[in-house]
Image (tube, grey):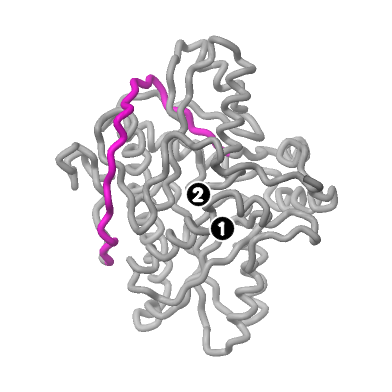
Amino acid sequence: MPSAGHGASSHGVVIPPQADYPLPAFSVGRFSMVQPYDALLVVSFGGPEGPDDVMPFLENVLRGKNVPRQRMLEVAEHYQHFGGVSPINAQNRELIAALQTLLDEQGPHLPIYWGNRNWHPLLVDTIRQMARDGIRRSLAFVTSAFSSYSGCRQYREDIQRACQQVGPSAPAIDKLRVFFNHPGFIQAVVDSIKDARRQLPAPQSQGTPIVFTAHSLPLAMAETSNYESQLRQACGLVAEALGNPPWQLAYQSRSGPPSQPWLEPDICDVLEKLAHEGDIETVIVQPIGFLSDHMEVLFDLDTEAKALCDQRGLKMIRAKTVGTHPAFMQMIRQLILERTSDAPRQSVGDLPAGHDICPTDCCLPPPRPGR
């Protein structure tokens, strides 16, 4: 990781070192409501850690959702292909360990807690422990870069509900902003594609098309947020930093009934079309909508999409997610500094940095059928 002095601005914020391809100039803003905090809470989706966990976990995920049971059984089988263990918990432990080391070395000096939406450690249990430890005010880092009901507002609702269950001793918890256009996130994605390109001959690497993927959403949910525009902005910024290769955005992992419209095109449809174009031999797939190589990356991309490419004679190179990339770790630290000091709010591109306090109409849940 870069040292505290590497690339530091006049405000003491560490700027990730630039890659061979320069990022666009980033803008900064100010957030004046500096607050004292005594902890950081990492909030994530959660995943099973053994065969017996799979069905209870999926029942938690799908409770109250209009998802056919047959689809739930299909997803359960995906997990069983990997021994009933999702990589997401282990990857969150790696992220927390790397981030704790960084904060211990460079500050701010905050203990890190971890709570999940759908599986252990559950959010309510973690917040109860925070209360026992005397934590009074905490920031929350949610492992989702983009705005949507399921990726932002629902996590805030989960935190609020868990705090209500814990009662008056629960700490006040403020969510860090979304970071789709933070230069540290963009740099980490750029570097992942540069690593993927190293598997290709130099003359071929620049022109190889890139397909970015993100989790599909029901259209009714996508319409209540800036999810699509944020994704397209992030993809465009990465492509610009890489010299503007051909690229497109695709979606994956839809789970609703066929009658319900979801964001398209599906990744497999995109790969099928590229294979039929004839003059494309290789494609790079980068899951920009995901932060770690969890089950939806391992199965939907590394298994299903890869099998399709093999059948069609198209070479697929899957670029890594950002994981614990040093620029991404520094980004999380910078998001904390925005709320604990006068550090500048960094953003890249045309869209502003995400808001710290969400408006009441931000990322509303989709309307229920019949309303």
Taking 353 as reference, is 113 left or right?
right
In the image, the segment drawn in magenta is 21-44
Residue 29 magenta-highlighted: yes
Which residue is situated farthest in the front direction here?
371
Q: CA distance from mark 2 to mark 1?
A: 10 Å
Q: Residue at x 66, y 73 (%)?
A: 269
Q: Secondary structure at mark 2?
A: loop
Q: Secondary structure at mark 1?
A: strand
Q: Position of residue 32 (x, y in %)?
A: 29, 30
Taking 231 as reference, is 77 left or right?
right
Q: Residue at x 76, y 43 (%)?
A: 65
Q: Position of residue 142 (x, y in %)?
A: 50, 38
**Quadrant in which the N terminus is drawn:** top left
> Which quadrant of the figure has residue 22?
bottom left
- Residue receiving disc 1: 214
- Residue receiving disc 2: 146
Which residue is situated farthest in the bottom direction here?
279
In the rendered image of this protein, does residue 187 appear above or below residue 173?
A: below
Q: Position of residue 16 (x, y in %)?
A: 27, 50
Q: Residues within 10 Å of mark 1 (few under 14, many from 20)?
A: many
User: Do residues under tags 2 and 1 come within 8 Å of each other at their CB atoms?
Assistant: yes
Of 224 and 109, nearer the camera is: 224
Q: Amino acid at mark 1?
A: Ala
Of 182 and 125, nearer the camera is: 182
> Which quadrant of the figure has residue 311?
bottom right
In the rendered image of this protein, does residue 63 appear above or below residue 198?
A: above
Of 281 and 8, nearer the camera is: 8
Q: Position of residue 320 (x, y in %)?
A: 47, 58
Q: Residue at x 61, y 54 (%)?
A: 223
2 vs 1, front mark: 2
Q: Residues within 10 Å of mark 2 (few under 14, many from 20)?
A: many
